[in-house]
Amino acid sequence: MSDLPRPSPTPPAAAPAAVASYEDATARLEAIIRRLDSGDAGLRETLDLCREGRTLVEYCAGELEAVGQGLQELALDDLVDRLEAGAGPGPS
Amino acid sequence: MADLHPDPTVAPPAASGRPDGIAGSRLPGPFGVGAYAGKLRDELRKRARVQLVGEVFNLRHSKAKVYFELRDADGAVPCSMWRNELERARLPGGALADGVQVVAAGGPDYYPGSRTSSPSFSFAVTALRVAGEGDLLARVERLRRTLAAEGLLDRQARLSRPVLPHTIGVITGEGGKARDDVLAGLARRGWAGRVVWAFAPVQDRHAAPRITRALQDLAATGQVQVIVVARGGGSLADLMGFSDETLCRTVALLGVPVVCAVGHHTDRTLIDDVAAQACSTPTHAAEAAVPLHCGEARVALRGAAVRLQTHGRRALLERARTLRRLARAPTDHVARHRRRLHQSLREIRAAGARSHAARERDVARRALVLSRKASAGSGADSAARHARLQALDAALTALDPERVVERGYAVVDDGAGNVLTSARGARAAGAVRLRFRDGPVRATVDEDQPDATPDQGEHP
């Protein structure tokens, strides 16, 4: 994980615009790299694509990091208790 | 039961210190009980084999056999059946359960027991089928058709499944092997997110309501992106709960995708049909819950990041080059124009020279044509040849000594025609001839001494 690009200090709260999930992000990322590899993109487009691609890589890295910090096990009852104790609207 | 007497040769009475019989009894014996038990088993096995019909009660499983009682209103018989024979019956999951009416074929048998194990009588079932109104298979099939008609069988399959869930709910038996299998499957994916365990009995008749409740609770937390329902080992009869109508309707209508690993390959329970995905083992179910291999994804993402960086850097270098080119542009522009002007000038000059030469060639050609035409007009080439001969003649004539004589000079010779051209020659000849224009004159050289001044012989 250490040589993965770190998520930015303020990790994206949600996926970048028009990207709803990890698979969407990777699909878009692949499309971007295909476009860049084709060599058809002009300078302006290349720089725009690189910027968008970096955002996607950061998002994906954040997602992978979320499931790479070590397994966390929790009993359902504990989770329910925690939700009910929390400020959020727990299940009634 | 007189025919149950043990063979006297096997157990001879009172031959080996065996106690005496009961005083006054006329019955034979006493015989060894083990021998009697073996004989009893043999006699029971001789009885006619039949088919019985009744309701299953108190179904129990051991490693090799299943045990139950067959009952009806008038009585009951304890039954046993080898598991491999039960499996040969290919009953659907959960079909054999308490309360189910079955037809059992077989015959009475007796287990003689031993010093350390208890004897038992049972009706040994060798073939079995579920029958009557209590036919679970038929009931499950009816329910399957009902759910299909309601469009509930593929609702889960249409749910979108995240390839990388952060939180997974797992419903399984507490302390069962299934739990370890699920963890192994997750580890195989390189996934180490959050697992919410909901333990529920998965083998008895309380299983269905408890699992249903756990499903609802897990979904209600709004925290899990996928739920795994995993049953560990267990017999086919344990599967009944997973065809429960309430449970299956709950799964079908759940907004969270459910991956189940309940049955074996051969038996299909109703939950397999309503769940988003049915797997053969808990390990596979865990892997199905996390379609993305996280380790591979990390490698791929690193690759993507590197390629983006390469492309970005290349583009920036290109931009720098473009800017440098743009900065140089005005000077380059002027230089380019100057070069172009010079070039134009050279071209114009060259063109002028070319046209001048062409004109000259034209004039010369025309002059030649004109002169030829003129010559042709006055006797063609003969005139020119004549003129040339005249010129040659004039040149020859000019060189002829006679012409010189005619102009007033004289030629001196020795009288024999040898021209004397020096004073010495003349003195040596002594007598000379002078040839004048009008004729020769003989003369004698009368001078003996050579003159101080050189003699110009041809001078007159």
Image (cartoon, coloured by chain):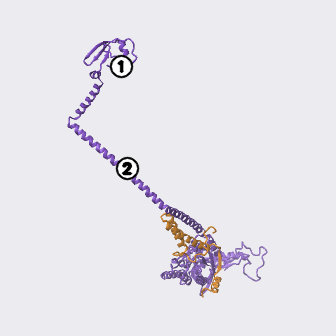
Chain colours: A orange, B purple
Towards the viewer: B137 or A85: A85
Q: State the image quarter where residue B37 is shown.
A: bottom right
Give the quadrant of the C terminus of chain B. Answer: top left
Give the quadrant of the N terminus of chain B. Answer: bottom right
The amino acid at mark 2 is Ala
Vertical position of residue B11 compared to residue B390: above or below: below
The residue at the point 64 percent across, 68 percent down is: A2
Mark nearest the camera among 2 and 1 is: 1
| Rendered location of residue B140, percent (x, y) | 53, 81
The circle drawn on residue B456 is 1
Compared across the picture, whether B335 is left or right of B241 comes to left
Towards the viewer: B1 or B261: B261
> Which residue was labeled with disc 2?
B350
Res. B391 visible in picture: yes
Q: State the image quarter where residue B212 is shown.
A: bottom right
Compared across the picture, whether B120 is left or right of B318 comes to right
Callouts 2 and 1 on one subunit? yes
